[in-house]
Image (cartoon, rainbow, N blue to C red):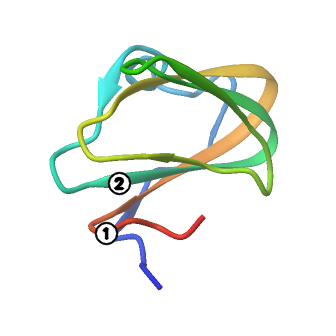
Amino acid sequence: MAEPYRSTPVFDESTIPAALRGEHRTKPGVWGLIRVIEGELNLTYCEPHAEKVLSPGNPGVVNPEQTHFVTPLGQVKMQVDFYTEPPDP
């Protein structure tokens, strides 16, 4: 089972960095696993366009170099784990 090599701090709806709210991408060879601890978060993939509502027990996977952004849906607590191989959500 893949283990994350790095994790962000836990963010809430007011501390999610602007960089995560705007279009950005993971680095080559890096997967992101967006975990919601409380509440809901909208994950938008830019190409091809798709949206997914994340919640506890329903994380979102971002593939290497995949452009995306997140939008909190009310009060939320979330964290991103980074992997060098595909994570098992």
Q: Position of residue 46 (x, y in %)?
A: 41, 18
Residue 78 occupies quadrant: top right
Helix, strand or loop status at disc 1: loop
Kind of residue sitting beneath label 1? Glu
Indicate whether 3 appears above or below 36.
below
Residue 24's tag is none
77 is higher (above) or lower (below) than 4: above
Q: Which residue is mark 1?
A: 85
Q: Which residue is at the front of the view, 14 or 61?
A: 61
What residue appears at the point 55 percent right and 22 percent down from the top-left corner? 50
Instruction: Give the side of residue 16 with respect to residue 5, left or right.
Output: right
Q: Neighbour class for label 1 at 10 Å: few (<14), some, many (≥20)?
A: some
Q: In the image shown, does 47 or 4 lie closer to the viewer?
A: 47
Whole-Å distance between the Cαs marked 2 and 1?
A: 7 Å
Quarter of the picture holding the C terminus? bottom right
Q: Which residue is disc 2 drawn over?
A: 31
Q: Amino acid at mark 2?
A: Trp
Rendering coords of residue 5 (x, y %): 33, 70
In which quadrant of the rendered view does residue 44 lie?
Answer: top right
Question: Which residue lies at the image location 36% right of the left edge and 16% below the top edge?
Answer: 23
Q: Is residue 10 visible?
A: no
Residue 74 place in picture, x, y as percent? 82, 20
Looking at the image, which residue is at 15% across and 48% down?
28
- Whether residue 61 sits left or right of residue 19 in the image: it is right
Q: Is residue 24 left or right of residue 37?
A: left
Q: Are marks 2 and 1 in contact (CB under 8 Å)?
A: yes
Q: Earlier in the sequence, mark 2 or mark 1?
A: 2
Residue at image coords 32%, 24%: 24
